[in-house]
Image (cartoon, grey):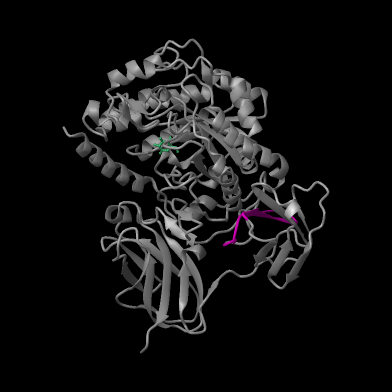
Amino acid sequence: MNKNIKFSKFKLIAMAALCFFQFNCKNEKHKSIPENSEIDYVTETVGDVDFGKTKMSEYTPEIRANMNKLYDAKFGMFVHFGPYAQLAGEWKGKKGAAEWIMRRSFIPVAEYEKEAAGKFKPENFNAKEWVDIAENAGMKFIVLTAKHHDGFAMYKSEHPYNLFDFAGFNRDILKELAEECAKRDMKLGFYYSQDQDWHEKGGAGNDWDFGSVIKPADEFDAYFREKAVMQIKELTTNYGDIFMVWFDTPFQITDEQSQLMMDVVKEHQPGALVNARLGNGYGHFDVSIDNGTTPSVSKATWLPDLKVPWQTHESVTKHGWGYTSRGAELDRSEDYSDFIYSLCRIIGNGGVYLLNVAPRPDGTIPESQVNSIHVIGDWLKVNGEAIYGADPSPLKFPPYAITSKPGKVYLHVQDLENNQVALTGLLSKVNKAYVLADTSQQALKFTQKNEKLSVTLPDDLKQQYVTVVVLEIEDQIAKVVDETLQQAADGSIQLPVSKCEFSIRRISYDYDKKVTHRWGENTKQGLIWTVNIKQPGRFKVVSEDSGNDGFEYQLSTLKDTITLNAKGEIGKLTKKQQDGYIKIDEAGIHKLTVYPTIPASKATKGSYEFKGLELIPAKE
Ligand code: GLC
């Protein structure tokens, strides 16, 4: 059978599955949760379809304590390590993927066993070195792939396909890592691919050996109970305190199976945080889409609302998450500033950052990767106050990364062209401004008039990558302007993507181009604008996007809906006048939403960009 056909079939199913595990958020209320609150914040906020089944009221004190730790920790190390590293991104002389190489190069189980798993002996693995590296990067927890989609367990498991028994490597590296972490103040979590397992007949994903990607329910259930659940039991019993279990790609897992897994984790580790990729709405915290293939790190914006942490993950490597010789040995010094700024941006939006490294097959982490993360660590040694335990920006639509703590606002400044750090929207009186890296806290000159603030940052206080300017303010919680969008005097209404909120976190945003990235992939990805309408009426709609006529989406008010069509050229951002009108018949505050109706990826092959809408009053 033709491999391309098989692959595209896989892609279709994978996409359907992806849609399936996206979570929903129809309710647009965002508020922070009062301490010890019993409200089901997660459920209430994101709806009950894809994320939020694990209600806040079910969060045990142990879970709440770890939630708080995660919220304070902010920054962790993801490690993708497994037999795929052995292949280093190459199969039979041809370029292949990283941790997906078995699937992408259709390597039969028997050959993968022989060439990758059987030869994999991470002899230079040194737990102390790994923990040192993470610690020096300012990371507070480590999440290691205990079993990835290739089905190979990285520890001594009862299931024989593992590093100890199958590869004959006479050490349990998870045990060594767990013991090292326990000695230090480093929390440990495990990544576990519960659904895809390309080694097993019943696991999802392998159709080149076993005929289909999605498996008959009984076969999958047998795999799930006999391998996945058993291994999660081992992982949550044999390695001390587990901070987090990071599940992935819930393609065919049923509600009952997700629930079972949740129960197993809870029984053995009542404090372990489970991510939402367990599937079917289960999990304690949500994670973003993968960083994808955008240049450098992907820039994503998120709901700046939660004390309940959500998390995004990116990699210091290119071409995947696991080791490849072409993507994991690169000097990334040109991106150092962006790595740091990415951290600031994520924390400024209420998130937690998991940054991935990919060790070589011998277990060592390449120096170039260590350099990339240590640059962040060095920056954090000086600027950590603005990150660890910090709250998000008090402004919903900050012009750049901003974090806050009681009585303080931190402005994270990258690439400042002149000496003026400007901010519009802060109402609290500023008492003092200084650079966080300046130990003498020399007061900076500033002017503040109504909501406009301008701080003078002298050249000699500008830092190499990102400078943090601290504002000491009069209020404990910063007061800011009302950010509701206003209808213009000529009656027009601008709805730029830069001023909308996302209904779910699985959309990302390109801060440079001010367009969405990967919006339109599924019908739950809503964009929401809050607008104050003074002159109601009928409006023509002008859209600005880059799709073709295969992609449609809907603009809605509470009472009216209009279908919009991308009707242009893929990859070319243009303004288009749409057919028809939208009616807004009352003055007041309105929520205007846009939801995709036909997934954009089908019509535009993933390159779709959306910049926003303009509503123009119709001449009666
Ligand atoms: C994915 C990929 C996987 C990677 C993970 C990291 O969904 O399947 O290879 O481990 O994302 O977030």
Residue placed most toward the observer, 122 or 142: 122
Q: Residue at x 46, y 70 (%)?
A: 495
Could you tell whether 233 is left or right of 433 in the image?
left
One can see residue 384 in this view: yes
The x and y percentages for residue 203 are 31, 29
**Picture mark count:** 0
Ligand 1: quadrant of the figure = top left
Q: Is residue 403 magenta?
A: yes
Q: Residue at x 57, y 36 (%)?
A: 372
Q: Quadrant of the N terminus?
A: top left
Compared to residue 486, the image places residue 59 above or below, namely above
- The picture quadrant where one finds residue 394 is bottom right
Q: Is residue 408 magenta?
A: yes
The x and y percentages for residue 299 are 50, 51
Give the magenta-colored segment's residue range. 397-415
Q: Residue furthest bottom?
A: 620
The x and y percentages for residue 600 are 32, 56
